[in-house]
C-alpha cells in the first residue's frame, strides 16, 4: 500500500474541508435514525428553539471534522491516523443528520461555519503535533464535553419531538464510543486548565451559533 506524504494528506484534508462546508461529504452505511420516526407538531417557538439547538450540533460536527482532519494530518502513528479518519467519517453521519433536520425545521446551518472549521483544524493540527497521546487525550475530552452538551439539549427538546431525540441519542452514543476509543488507544487526561479553556470556548461558540 502506498504511503501518503504530508503533502498528500494536506491535499486530502483540503478536499475534506470543501466537502464538509459544501455538503459533499462521505458518510458511512448507516441510515438516519430519524427517518423511521413520525414528525411531531411543534409550535413556532419550539421549532425556533430546536433549530437553534440543531444549528449548534451541526456546527459542532463541522468542528469535529476539522479537529479529526487536523489531528490526522500531524499524527505520528499510522494506526492513530486511521482511527482519526474513521471517526471523522462517522462524524459525517452526524453532519448529514443534523443538516437534514435543519431543513425540516426550515432553518439553516451557521453562517460562520468556515471560520469554525479552520479554527478547529488549526487546533487539531497543533494537538496532533504535540504527540499522539495528547492528541488522543484531546479527542477524548472533546467527546466527553460533547456528550454533556447533547444531554443538555435532549432535556430541552419537546417531549414528543422524537425525530430530534433519535438523532441526538445516536450521536451521544457515537461520541461516547469515540471517547472510549481515544482513551483505549493511549490518550491521556488533559490538564484541568486546558479542559476549562475548552469548555469556555465551546460555551461562547454555542451562544453565537444558536442565533447565527
Image (cartoon, rainbow, N blue to C red):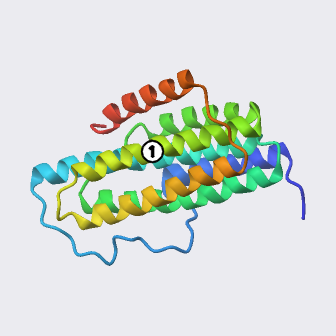
Residue 181 placement: quadrant? bottom right
> Residue 146: image x %, image y %?
45, 44
> Residue 68: image x %, image y %?
63, 46
Secondary element at tag 1: helix
Q: Quadrant of the N terminus?
A: bottom right
Give above or below for 114 relative to 105.
above
Q: For the view shown, which residue lies furthest in the left direction?
A: 43
Q: Quadrant of the C terminus?
A: top left
Task: Kindly tell me whether residue 134 is visible in this rendering.
Answer: yes
User: Does residue 58 appear left or right of residue 101 in this picture?
Assistant: right
> Residue 41: image x %, image y %?
12, 66
User: Does residue 166 appear left or right of residue 41 in this picture?
Assistant: right
Bin the neighbour count of mark 1 within 10 Å (Cα to Cα): few under 14, some 14-19, many 20 and up: many
Circle 1 sits on which residue? 146
Q: For the view shown, which residue lies furthest in the bottom direction?
A: 36
Q: Residue at x 82, y 47 (%)?
A: 77
User: Does residue 141 appear left or right of residue 212 in this picture?
Assistant: right
Give above or below for 1 relative to 30.
above
Give above or below for 180 relative to 211.
below
Q: For the view shown, which residue lies furthest in the right direction?
A: 2
| Circle count | 1
Amino acid at each position: 500500500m502506498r504511503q501518503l506524504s504530508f503533502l498528500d494528506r494536506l491535499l486530502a484534508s483540503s478536499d475534506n474541508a470543501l466537502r464538509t462546508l459544501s455538503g459533499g461529504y462521505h458518510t458511512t452505511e448507516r441510515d438516519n435514525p430519524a427517518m423511521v420516526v413520525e414528525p411531531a407538531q411543534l409550535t413556532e417557538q419550539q421549532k425556533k428553539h430546536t433549530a437553534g439547538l440543531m444549528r449548534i450540533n451541526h456546527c459542532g460536527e463541522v468542528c469535529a471534522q476539522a479537529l479529526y482532519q487536523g489531528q490526522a494530518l500531524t499524527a505520528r502513528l499510522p494506526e492513530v491516523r486511521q482511527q482519526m479518519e474513521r471517526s471523522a467519517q462517522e462524524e459525517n453521519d452526524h453532519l448529514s443528520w443534523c443538516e437534514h433536520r435543519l431543513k425540516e425545521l426550515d432553518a439553516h446551518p451557521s453562517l460562520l461555519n468556515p471560520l469554525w472549521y479552520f479554527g478547529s483544524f488549526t487546533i487539531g493540527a497543533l494537538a496532533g503535533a504535540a504527540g499522539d497521546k495528547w492528541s488522543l487525550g484531546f479527542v477524548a475530552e472533546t467527546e466527553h464535553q460533547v456528550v454533556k452538551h447533547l444531554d443538555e439539549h435532549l432535556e430541552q427538546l419537546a417531549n414528543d419531538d422524537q425525530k430530534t431525540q433519535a438523532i441526538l441519542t445516536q450521536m451521544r452514543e457515537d461520541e461516547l464510543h469515540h471517547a472510549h476509543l481515544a482513551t483505549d488507544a493511549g490518550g491521556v487526561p488533559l490538564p484541568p486548565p486546558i479542559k476549562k479553556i475548552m469548555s469556555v470556548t465551546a460555551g461562547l461558540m454555542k451562544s453565537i451559533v444558536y442565533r447565527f
